[in-house]
Amino acid sequence: MKNLNFLLLIAGLLLLPGCKDYVDEYVTYTVNEPVFMSASEFRSSVDVEQPKPIEKQGKIVFYNDYLYISQPEKGIHVIDNRDPSNPRNIAFLELLGNADMHVRDNVLYADSYIDLVWFDITDPAKPVFKGRKEEVFPQAFPIPENGYGIDSEKLMDRDNNIVVGWKLVEKKVLVRNYKPRWWSWGGVTEDKVYSDAASNGGGGVGVAGSMSRFAIYQDNLYTVMNNQLGIFDLSKEVPEKIGEDLHVGFSVETIFSYKNCLFMGTPTGMIIYSVENPLKPEYQSMITHAFGCDPVVVENDIAYVTVRSGTFCGQNANELIIVDVSDVKKPNHIVTYGMKGPKGLGIDNGILFVCDEGLKIFDAKDPQTIMANKLAHFADIDGFDVIPFNNVLMVIAEDGIYQYDYSDVKSIRRLSRLPIGK
């Protein structure tokens, strides 16, 4: 009789209406949806214009007494720097999606989101657009600055249009949460809930940020985008893309050419590739460090790396790392110094310039005594990157382009400031 009652109880439970093993509910989330521009409109927007005020700091390149300054995603400012005490803004290249650039033999090469473009700058005041390679940087999209993920499904549906921005949208998705059941004498008990929906809303992915970089060695332009190293042969009038991109991994952020090697900064360390065969870069070694954003410069077989913490940089390391790279297969760590928040840096004839708490300048001839040999500290600027050349230091900062004369390291003096922003 007891067995019969138990069987009837089980049958009744199984027949109860509404006993589902899942719960459906709507979840609302916020995501960046791509803003598209037609490819024809995008590629016809290149223009050489009268000089415009520099609104935002970007990358800098110096060539034949002229400075080229990228205004992120907008274009390139041309600065006549023949007199560093009085730099003059002389032209603006409207170039949507620009982030990086480099110059070789009076030709300026620059990215324009997914394309590579180039200009004849024989007359820097009147650059001439010469050509475009389409779709050579297929993953080069604008970087959302709001911390939300990207609607990957919309991104895949670009249908030959170009992604030129983002708009925040709220979306609602139906999520089905399945609930495992365990039986007990008292009937049915429910434990933790499992969901079969993606946590970022059905396909949205997060983007932490990336930094693209250009370097030139011999007749070749090397580009790093995300995890890929691209090579362009510049020996002919029209640059030629060489083979498939080389996967170097580690989210490469910066690239520096020294002798016959490429030194790449990543969030976790410095990677060295040999370009003894320029068209077939060969991995040599990697020196690791704590997570952080890190540019690299090299002089006299000594590499200087800054590691900076921050939203897009990883953990909380703020350091200057110095490495002996005379044997690129076996780099040797020399010393690490704590810093506050270093960004760009430069080295010239043993003088080290670091954008940290403004701008710090050191005598670096002996790496072990750098901190004891500080030559100057300009704390009144927010330095981002530097170019030291022929005793003139060019610094791009949050509010301007600053220039300093360091011909006398005991009396470094400011020459000028060209404003950035309002």
Image (cartoon, grey):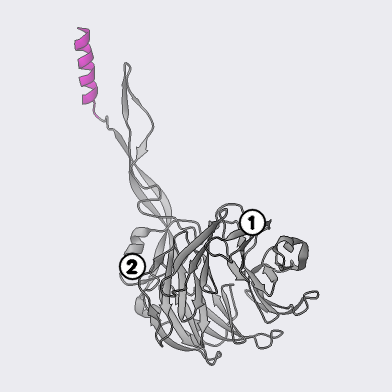
Taking the view exactly as shown, the residue that stands out farthest to the top is: 1
Residue 85 image position (x, y, % from top left): 72, 84
Residue corresponding to mark 1: 318
| Residue 1 visible (yes or no) | yes
Disc 2 versus disc 1: distance between alpha carbons?
40 Å
Task: Mark 2 vs mark 1: give the one in front.
Answer: 1
Q: Is residue 8 magenta?
A: yes
- 200 or 63, which is in the foreground? 63
**Horizontal side of residue 137 vs 80, given as left or right:** left
Task: Tell me the magenta residue range.
Answer: 1-17
In the rendered image, the quadrant that contains the N terminus is top left
Q: Please, is residue 165 above or below residue 85 in the view?
A: above
Residue occupying image coordinates x 44% and y 67%: 282
Q: Please, is residue 239 above or below residue 260 in the view?
A: below
Q: Is residue 413 magenta?
A: no
Residue 45 image position (x, y, % from top left): 43, 82
| Residue 312 visible (yes or no) | no
